[in-house]
Amino acid sequence: MFASKRLSKELSKLHDKLPPGITLIKADDFTEWLMDIRVIDSNPLYQDEVYRLKFVFSQTYPIEAPEVVFVKDEDHPIPWHPHVYSNGIICLDLLDRQGWSPVHNVESVCVSLQSMLTSNTKQERPPGDEHFVKHNKQRPKDINFVFHDNQV
Amino acid sequence: MSSPEPIPPPNDRRSSRASSNASLAVPTLDNTREPVELLVVGGPPSTPSPLALRASNSPSSNRRKSRIAKLPPDVHLLEYLSACDSNLICLICHSPFDKPVQLACEHFFCRECLDHAWDAQHDAQKTCPTCRGRVDTTREPLPVPKIIATMLDELVVKCPNTKSGCDWIEQRVNVHDHVLLYCEYTLVDCPDFDCHLYITQKDFHKGCLHYTEHQRTTCPNRSTACPHCSVELLRLELNAHVKDICPKVIVPCPGTLVGCTVAVERADLAGHAKGCSMAIMAPYFRDQQARIERSEARLEPLSRKVGILEDGLSKITNMLYPPNANDSSFPVTNPLDPNSDAFTTAPLVPTPDFRLPPASFPPVPPSHDTSQTPLTNPTPPPFDSQIHHLLTLHGSLRDEVSRIANALTDYEGRTNMMIINENQRVKDEMLHTNAAINGMRMQLHWLVSATLQQRTGSTNSTGNSTSRAGGSTDSNASGTQGTNSNLGSRSAGASATLHLPLRRLSDSTRQNTKL
Ligand SMILES: [Zn+2]
Ligand SMILES: [Zn+2]
Ligand SMILES: [Zn+2]
Ligand SMILES: [Zn+2]
Ligand SMILES: [Zn+2]
Ligand SMILES: [Zn+2]
């Protein structure tokens, strides 16, 4: 109830106005939304590419963080970033249990991810990406990431 | 709602929620253990007593209670007429604050939202959802400035029942009262005992509409065939169809009233009625019948009225001229009475029957006549006319009234005298008391002065010579004070009295003159 009230407010605001480079793709219900983000600045790593984000909300949103991952299909690759695993899982403190705060919202998460990509210059995956992608069965928010690098 | 609620200490949160649940009577999902807590919480005088609680749990009153229970409006779902200032928006629920509180870091949240956010946090380390600053839960959250509450109260909202048709638009502070008290579109429990649906307050008196609605639109068995004409129709409308419409039902000729015994199918009835003279006559007969009934109904109260008047009249007669004052010399004819002929034919048997001006009345029901036969009431009416009689009565009443008025004036005068006397006595007593109080004041004054003199006499003995030199005129004044106030303490010396404040002098003289 709380979640749907809050999400309906967010949705009407997103329909109203969106920051540049962010598009609302699908929000049919209050459990799963799709958003597209684009890097505006001319960063050669992300030129001409659009990335698709999947938001999964729990009943306790916004008290609990939404689950946010990049999804991969023929038009939407997973962006290069030392905090983004090749299966789309994002290692960002904002989306972690400790880092999340109910004052964040879908738009602010998109903007944060957008700026995280904008400032990145390394075309690499997090250390141990291959192993992680192969063996991880946990849901993103249950993973205990070690935030090894706070500059990005 | 207008004034921010006093914020309970954080560790008291649960109890405050429980009591608010009680006052709103909202069925909550997690109220399995709340009622038990209610008994323990106690608190405001409005909390129902355990006895009342038990009574309200019995099934019958439970039903009645839930009928008046309405859901209070959810402030988070209100539709605002204009976009609200972004500074008044709660960052957690993204709607204008509802019962806002603030933290020491000057971040504001709805009370409920903050509680939600904190539910997920460790008890020992609550943080501000916005800035993650540590919160001292013994001190925070703090009440918000009054102006914030006022700005929120003045936001203009639409009634939450706008979709149902309510066009109420007003300040938010009033929405609670509107929905719970005034809005016609507020949902209440359906008045039907077996129906568990809701109905708008406006339609409450119409009874359960859900069943009808169900029969009309959703019931799989809703249609049936008329047993007479086999037309398909709603089961709900079958009775009305058979009674008034169905062409195959056998109905009697409208002339039954007058004696026609024909009964045919409704479709053929028109044909019969055209030829049946009784059916043609029937409307006129019905008209006549109705008119007669109306007249009879009007007659009934009139005859009762006549009876009452007659009764009263004979009583008055009896009172004025008791039965033993039998004097047949009085004229007994009533000039207005058309029946007077009967009286003149038998002048020796006087009649007691005083009819009121009779022309407009039908003959009185026989019961009156028999009860007032000459034999049962032989008193002759000893006056010319009823008017005369009434005038006499009026005169005597007037006398009585003036007598009572005199008595009243008399009584008033006596009461006044009594009050004046009593007042005088009380005044005297007060004078005595005053005198006594003044006496006591004098004594007290004397005692105080004496003590003061003793004290100053012992401490100021060294400074006596200088003060005496500077205050020769003052010593005169103090001398007069000594004699006036009758203190008899001259032995203490004029030098000692010098040190009394001069104000006392005037004070004591005033008292002297008063006595
Ligand atoms: Zn809020
Ligand atoms: Zn703060
Ligand atoms: Zn309304
Ligand atoms: Zn109903
Ligand atoms: Zn029929
Ligand atoms: Zn007939």
Image (cartoon, coloured by chain):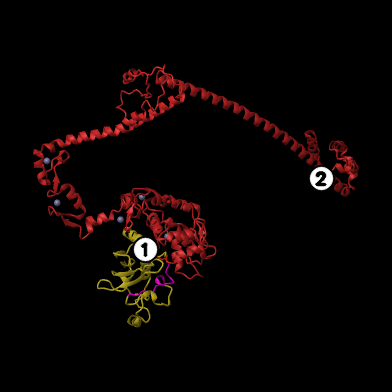
In the picture, residue B385 is in which quadrant?
top left
- Residue B409: x and y, percent? 58, 26
| Quadrant for the C terminus of chain B in the image | top right
Rendered colour, chain B: red
Which is closer to the viewer, label 2 or label 1?
A: 2
- Residue B352: x and y, percent? 38, 24
| Kind of residue at disc 1 | Met
Mark 1, secondary structure of its residue: loop
Does residue B384 appear to the left or right of B11 in the view shown? left
Cα gap from disc 2 to disc 1, whole angstroms: 81 Å
Does residue B7 appear to the left or right of B256 in the view shown? right
- Residue B437: x and y, percent? 76, 40
Rendered colour, chain A: yellow
Q: Which residue in the protein does label 1 denote?
A: A1
Query: What residue lies at 77% left-to-right and 37% top-to-bottom?
Result: B435
Q: Which residue in the protein does label 2 denote?
A: B448
- Whether the magenta-drawn stretch holds residue A90 is answered as yes
> Magenta part of the protein: which range?
A88-101
Mark 2, secondary structure of its residue: helix
| Kind of residue at disc 2 | Val
- Whether the magenta-drawn stretch holds residue B491 is answered as no
